[in-house]
Amino acid sequence: MINIGVLASGRGTNLQAIINAIKENKIEGKISIVISDNKDAYALKRAKENQIKAYYIDFTGFKNREEYDKRIVEYLRKEEVDLVVLAGYMKILSPYFVKAFQHRIINIHPALLPSFPGLHAQRQAIKYGVKISGCTVHFVDEGVDSGPIILQKAVEVDDRDDEESLAKKILQQEHQILVRAIQLISERRLYIQERRVVIKEVDLK
């Protein structure tokens, strides 16, 4: 069973997708803790409604990003978290955090990386005029949306799409591939080869 910690800054729909998948036995694991940098994040309410420990940690009480991340790492270690999932978490992790959970942090990004990293990926895609966009689950490294790619899912961009409508399309796929990635990790079916993530086939024998 995999022990998950989730970091979220907003609505928490990807958090809800994970919660639902665990209830439906699609993931053999549990979420032990949810942490947010936003006191009004609906993700915290979702956690509490599902009897998951939920904490808001105010960044203004710390002198820098590393000190803030040290506090979060303390919370995660206290819960003996195996995997950290960034589900709409809007802060960039410090090198300290990444090293503390090396190859045990994943993120969901609303674009087909390496295209359109960073904020407002859907807006970037619309402005650029791409015909295909999508989402990516990747391991987190010390760069911005630059870690090894685990899974991707494409969606078509319609001429009538705007940032909001494209975001809705992509979000539906985010829920699916994020759950799938966690499932693969819980089954120990992923390994990193240079910067490629390889999925082991299931041995049916």
Image (cartoon, grey):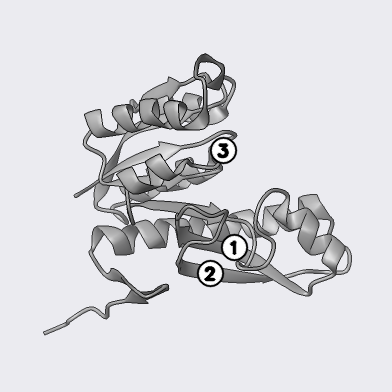
Q: Are marks 3 and 2 in contact (CB under 8 Å)?
A: no
Measured as percent of width and height from the top left, residue 189 is found at 26, 69
Which residue corresponds to the image point at 59% horizontal and 56% vertical from the top-left? Answer: 172
Total marks drawn? 3
Alpha carbons under labels 3 and 2: distance apart = 22 Å
User: What type is the residue that disc 2 sits on?
Assistant: Gln
- Give the labeled residue for mark 3: 91
Q: Quadrant of the C terminus?
A: bottom left
User: What type is the residue that disc 3 sits on?
Assistant: Lys
Q: Is residue 104 left or right of residue 166?
A: left
What mark, if any, has residue 152 been given in the picture?
A: 2
Measured as percent of width and height from the top left, residue 68 is found at 45, 26
Q: Are marks 1 and 2 in contact (CB under 8 Å)?
A: yes
User: What type is the residue that disc 1 sits on?
Assistant: Cys
Alpha carbons under labels 1 and 2: distance apart = 6 Å
Q: Earlier in the sequence, mark 3 or mark 2?
A: 3
Q: Secondary structure at mark 2?
A: strand
Residues 99 and 40: in front is 99
Q: Secondary structure at mark 1?
A: strand
Which residue corresponds to the image point at 74% horizontal and 56% vertical from the top-left? Answer: 122
Residues 82 and 94: in front is 94
What mark, if any, has residue 135 been given in the picture?
A: 1
